[in-house]
Image (cartoon, rainbow, N blue to C red):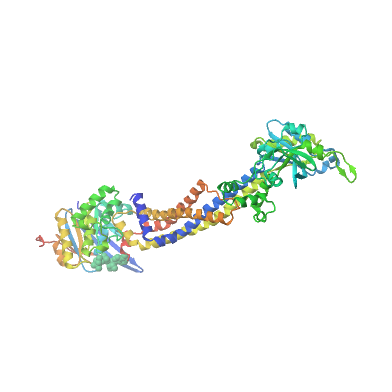
């Protein structure tokens, strides 16, 4: 008996018991639906996390951080100047390994345009700061080396800063405007593009819920932004990025750091950096790059190990591991559901062969071999698996729609073809495997026993 | 060499402590083209013998060859092949598949013989025509009378052009008129050259066969050639 005929017989048999077959399939349907939904949710989460990390400069971004000096160096720690622009200059001299580097001084500022007055934190930096942090300029120009060399009073600001300073003028191109930063006049030379997650962008472009998407990512103090821990951190990271104010680091030193009054005494200019960031050129040579940078810094820090590195690798790993764990536990639940579905199929196939024992006898009497009966039963239970799998795929689309409707702020599930294939294959495998035991039993029935029955 | 040869064939059943000798040493030869009737009282072992002959079961001891093949120790697959290629079996209770129509029932042996569907259809229709049921090919067995069902079963037994046709009380579930028609059908097949062995416990029927084999308590007690019969009116 060829496979086509077996399939046909299988379909007929299932069609003859539609309701019973559907009940039998439920376990498989649920299993496949939960498996694929879970795959898609975690794929969505992974996508969201990667998007987030990329927004923050990707894993190739490394920060040089302050660290406790080792005990044996404690007595002479003061000879180290700490992190200074000289460090950045030293790192910039490393050929090939480091592609971008920028010192950062963080300044609490008061920014004024006309009657509007806001507090922000400005980043006083080198031009490399912008590409390291994946900033793009929508209007005007980015910072230039000339700005740094000449300590120009210029700034590049984020979209939300412009929107706040000129609230009546949506999408205002403020390039050329003069603002007061801590009482000093600065010219706005550039405005960054508006940063948002792919999902928000898609929603905005589709015109869905524009106001809420914009405001939830635009308002730091929005209560909704704190209701989901993961999404809120994402939103605030986008919000923070949209609230950036950058100026040349030299300007900041001249204007705001030339005096450092502690008590009543001026300590002199303060050249210490708040942050020092660089970008690794080749992620495959990550370790090597860090070693080279450390060598350079040991020179500028006069042999004092008062610095360390802050990398995203570990954080990235943690996220990947988290997603793997969610996958594993979700997979376990889906697996149990599929297993139960499989047992259901086995059970119904056993009932079915008892019901059809006479049919089996007749088929055997006219020449069916044990093998033919085996194939017939396995094909039939595989067909249950296939139909259950297909219905499960459809159901998972529904499940995902519901999940998206329940929490639109979370990462949208991402349906990946490979996951569809995996989930469906599971259903087929379960169908085939659950049919094996009943099929072996059916194939072993002696024709004469089967004919005597009933 | 005869088409069928049985040498000291026995069949024992164990039911708990008890041993039942359903067949207690059968020696039998049936030649190509014979028309034999097996007769005997209930429980004498007729069906048991037929199942062995029909390769549906194997003997406990003794040897049995069919068309030169020793089937007494053959594997289950070999027996299935024998049933499929060389043997047609007609049961008292028809044993048709009620989910299939007449054509599909008759096609069934050809499916397991691996015959392509166009040839299958042609052969099945020819067999159905021989039993006079061409009008009913699309009916299911439940839409047919008992006699018609038995004719479908005969068509199914014929379809693969077997060497021998076995029939275990083919008229047992039919009224006497219908039974007579079915019996006439076997006689006609016999005239056309088929080898036929049928079981009955009706002496009248046994008398219409060319040879009468009587069994009792699992043994052959009488094996006679009947005088030639006139064609039944
Ligand atoms: N599977 C079995 N298990 C135990 N005993 C059996 C089995 N099959 C048949 N027998 C016994 O073997 C003996 C012969 O049975 P068989 O069916 O061959 O008789 P029969 O001649 O066909 O009778 P009938 O005319 O009533 O059909 C009987 O005693 C029966 O009880
Ligand atoms: Mg009997």
Q: Nearer the viewer, residue A157 or A367?
A: A157
Quadrant assignment, res A100 = top right
Q: Is residue A52 above or below residue B60?
A: above
Query: Horizontal placement of A218 versus B137: left or right?
Result: right
Q: Residue A377 lies in what quarter of the image?
A: bottom left
Q: Position of residue A117 (x, y in %)?
A: 75, 47
From this view, report whether residue B92 is shown above or below residue A306.
below
A234 to A336, vertically: above or below: above
Whether residue B67 appears in this view of the structure is: no
Using the rendered view, name the quadrant where residue A137 is placed. top right
Q: Quadrant of the C terminus of chain B?
A: bottom left
Residue A166, placed above or below residue B177 = above
Task: Provide residue A242's location: percent of width, then percent of height.
Answer: 68, 45
Query: Could you tell me residue A108's position as x and y percent?
Result: 78, 45
Extreme right residue here? Answer: A264
Horizontal side of residue A424 vs A328, given as left or right: left
Observer-nearest of A228 and A449:
A228
Q: For this rendering, which residue is in front, A234 or A210?
A: A210
Which quadrant of the frame does ligand 2 lie within? bottom left
Looking at this view, is A115 or B209 the one in front? A115
Image coords of residue A285 (percent x, y) = 66, 36
Write the residue at 37% across / 56% down: A443
Report the side of A186 relative to B118 (left or right): right
Q: Count the marks.
A: 0
Q: Is residue A144 visible?
A: yes
């Amino acid at each position: 008996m060829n496979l086509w005929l077996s399939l046909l017989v299988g379909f007929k048999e299932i069609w003859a018991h539609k309701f019973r077959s559907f009940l039998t399939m439920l376990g498989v349907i649920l299993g496949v639906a939960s498996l694929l939904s879970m795959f898609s949710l975690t794929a969505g989460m992974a996508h969201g996390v990667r998007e987030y990390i990329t927004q923050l400069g990707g894993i190739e971004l490394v920060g040089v951080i302050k660290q406790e000096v080792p005990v044996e160096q404690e007595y002479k720690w003061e000879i180290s100047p700490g992190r200074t622009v000289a460090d950045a200059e030293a790192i910039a001299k490393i050929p090939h390994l480091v592609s971008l580097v920028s010192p950062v001084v963080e300044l609490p500022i008061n920014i004024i345009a006309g009657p509007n007055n806001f507090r922000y934190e400005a980043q006083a930096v080198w031009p490399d700061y912008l590409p390291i942090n994946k900033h793009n300029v929508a209007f005007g120009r980015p910072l230039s080396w000339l700005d740094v060399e000449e300590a120009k009073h210029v700034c590049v600001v984020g979209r939300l800063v412009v929107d706040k300073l000129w609230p009546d003028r949506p999408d205002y191109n403020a390039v050329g405007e003069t603002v007061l930063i801590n009482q000093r006049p600065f010219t706005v030379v550039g405005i960054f593009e508006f940063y948002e997650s792919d999902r928000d962008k898609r929603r905005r472009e589709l015109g869905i819920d524009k106001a809420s998407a914009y405001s939830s990512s635009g308002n730091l103090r929005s209560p909704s932004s704190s209701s989901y821990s993961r999404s809120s951190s994402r939103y605030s990271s986008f919000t923070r990025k949209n609230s950036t104010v950058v100026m040349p680091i030299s300007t900041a030193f001249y204007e705001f750091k030339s005096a450092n009054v502690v008590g009543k005494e001026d300590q002199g200019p303060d050249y210490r950096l708040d942050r020092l960031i660089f970008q690794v050129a080749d992620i495959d040579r990550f370790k090597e790059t860090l070693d080279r940078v450390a060598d350079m810094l040991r020179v500028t820090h006069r042999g004092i190990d008062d610095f360390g590195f802050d990398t995203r690798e570990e954080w990235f790993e943690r996220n990947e591991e988290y997603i793997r764990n969610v996958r594993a536990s979700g997979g376990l639940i889906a697996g149990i559901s599929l297993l139960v579905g499989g047992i259901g199929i086995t059970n119904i196939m056993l009932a079915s062969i008892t019901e059809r024992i006479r049919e089996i006898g007749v088929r055997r009497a006219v020449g069916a071999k044990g093998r033919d009966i085996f194939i017939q039963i396995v094909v039939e239970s595989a067909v249950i698996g296939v139909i259950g799998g297909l219905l499960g795929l459809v159901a998972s689309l529904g499940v995902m729609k519901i999940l998206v409707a329940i929490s639109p702020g979370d990462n949208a599930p991402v349906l990946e073809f490979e996951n569809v294939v995996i989930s469906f294959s599971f259903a087929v495998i379960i169908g085939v495997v659950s049919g094996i035991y009943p099929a072996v039993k059916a194939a072993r029935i002696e024709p004469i026993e089967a004919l005597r029955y009933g | 060499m005869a088409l069928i040869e049985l040498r000291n064939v026995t069949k024992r059943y164990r039911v708990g402590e008890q041993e039942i000798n359903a067949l207690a040493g059968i020696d039998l030869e049936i030649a190509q083209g014979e028309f034999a009737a097996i007769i005997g009282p209930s429980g004498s072992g007729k069906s048991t013998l037929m199942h062995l002959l029909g390769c549906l079961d194997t003997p406990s001891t003794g040897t049995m060859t069919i068309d030169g093949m020793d089937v007494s120790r053959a594997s289950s697959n070999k027996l299935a092949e024998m049933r499929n290629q060389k043997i047609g079996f007609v049961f008292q209770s028809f044993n048709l598949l009620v989910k299939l129509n007449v054509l599909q029932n008759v096609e069934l042996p050809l499916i397991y013989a691996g015959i392509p569907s166009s040839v299958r259809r042609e052969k099945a229709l020819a067999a159905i025509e021989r039993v006079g049921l061409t009008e009913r090919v699309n009916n299911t067995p439940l839409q047919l009378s008992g006699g018609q069902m038995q004719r479908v079963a005969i068509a199914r037994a014929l379809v693969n052009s077997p060497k021998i046709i076995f029939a275990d009380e083919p008229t047992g579930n039919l009224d006497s008129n219908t039974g007579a028609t079915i019996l006439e059908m076997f006689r006609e097949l016999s005239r056309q050259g088929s080898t036929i062995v049928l079981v009955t416990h009706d002496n009248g029927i046994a008398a219409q066969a060319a040879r009468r084999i009587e069994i009792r308590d699992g043994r052959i007690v009488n094996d006679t050639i009947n005088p030639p019969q006139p064609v039944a009116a």
